[in-house]
Amino acid sequence: MKLLMAEHKSPIKIAAFTGSRAEYGLLSYLLKEINADSRFELQLIVSGSHLSSSFGLTVNEIESDGLKPTHFVPLGLERIPRPSMAELTSIALSGVAACLLSSQPELIIILGDRYEAFACAAASHLTGIPIVHLHGGETTEGALDDNLRHAITQLSTWHFTAADLYGKRVISMGKSAKNVFTVGPLVLDGILRATELNRPDFERLTGYRFGDTNLLVTYHPETLREDRGLEGFQALLNVLGQLDTHVLFTYPNADDGSEDLLKLLHHFVERHSDRAWCIPSLGHERYLAALHLFEAMGGNSSSGIIEAPIVGMPVLNIGDRQQGRFRFGPNVFDAPPETDSVSSALQQALLAGQRVVWPRKCPEPALTPTSAIMEWLRNQQWR
């Protein structure tokens, strides 16, 4: 008697790369959806500051989300002196290439524009793995990331952009319109699903203490400036030193210049320990909760151009790091890196932040970015 066995289809191997806390926060909901779908096998490559204790060892956040990294690509960020961005890129390229040659996924998902992501894109292209690029077509005129993002776009086959403007830019770079999809910023998934926290719970989880006015600060190196943005950060600290505002700093990213920013940050917190705190990483959930709990945000992070404006949180945006990027809402107050200008813009942001209803209002899109991307993956027309 013959037993007829149903044909067993192996799950489709889909790789994804993450090299920083900010980019993982945007990717996390998509990664969890892929991981939960039996049609797919998620091959998660973890690298960059995730594996550095100096930057909060945020690989722990990935694992606490129930995701199991398939490959680790350490870059040696703990070395003294720290390797240059060029050297770190070469280490990442070699490490990711080895992962891809070993696992042979059908495609790889890469988000954004950082040097780690560029290294992953180069490795994927050279090993013949097609790339899905998220958040391409954007512009940050004050950072090296700008050209890296466009290079990743050129190496990629499919593109999921955050706004129509960005989709059109990708097409204008010679990419096929049929492979370009505008789905909105991936942070929408997090904003809509984030667990609400009140101020006492946030204080218990972080050690921060709220005052009458509160500012959340994330300031990264400005990699195209000779001083790496130190002037702008010092201007901000000068202003904060004269105010009674309570401040929570999160760490800068791992770009060149971050060590000097951290020295200034820690010195300020030590001098103002009654109203200033710092934490390497809030984690994505607590960071999104903070958008509803603080009066305003300050710094030069993309979260001040995308996440905060989406929920209506006022922002002090310093310098040129985010120059050219589409703002997803009002109340972004720009300031050049000088004390008087930063002071004026900060006062406007804090005043605007005191006029809101708590919690801030969230958008209600018909289809979230993760849902749109998962629908595309499941229909398998890309195969």
Image (cartoon, rainbow, N blue to C red):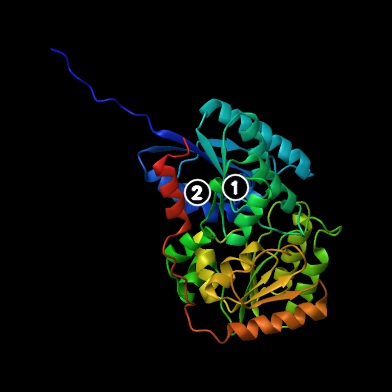
Q: Is residue 311 left or right of residue 259?
A: left
User: Residue at label 2?
Assistant: 62
Residue type at mark 2?
Ile
Looking at the rendered structure, the kind of residue marked 1 is His
Pinpoint residue 35: horizontal percent, then vertical percent: 41, 43
In the rendered structure, the answer to whether residue 176 lies left or right of residue 364 reads right
Q: CA distance from mark 1 to mark 2?
A: 9 Å
Q: Residue furthest right?
A: 226
Return the residue nearer the eye: 325 or 217: 325
Closer to the N terminus: mark 1 or mark 2? Answer: 1
Is residue 19 among what the camera can see? Answer: yes
Q: Marks 1 and 2: CB-CB under 8 Å? A: yes
Q: Position of residue 326 (x, y in %)?
A: 65, 65
Mark identifier at residue 50: 1
Could you classify mark 2 by the number of other residues whose Cα lies within 10 Å: few (under 14), some (14-19), or many (20 or more)? many
Is residue 318 depicted above or below 24 in this figure? below
Residue at 42 percent of width and 54 percent of height: 371
Q: Nearer the viewer, residue 245 or 155?
A: 155
Taking the view exactly as shown, the residue that stands out farthest to the top is: 1
Residue extending farthest left: 1
**Residue 350 point in image, percent of width and height:** 64, 82
Q: Nearer the viewer, residue 107 or 94?
A: 107
Q: Horizontally, is 221 left or right of 13 in the view?
A: right
- Asked which secondary structure carries label 2, the reply is helix
Q: Kindly identify the residue that appears in the image at 44 percent across and 53 percent down.
A: 372
Q: Residue at x 61, y 46 (%)?
A: 19
**On the rendered image, what quadrant is the N terminus found in?**
top left
Task: Indicate the secondary structure of the residue bearing disc 1.
Answer: helix
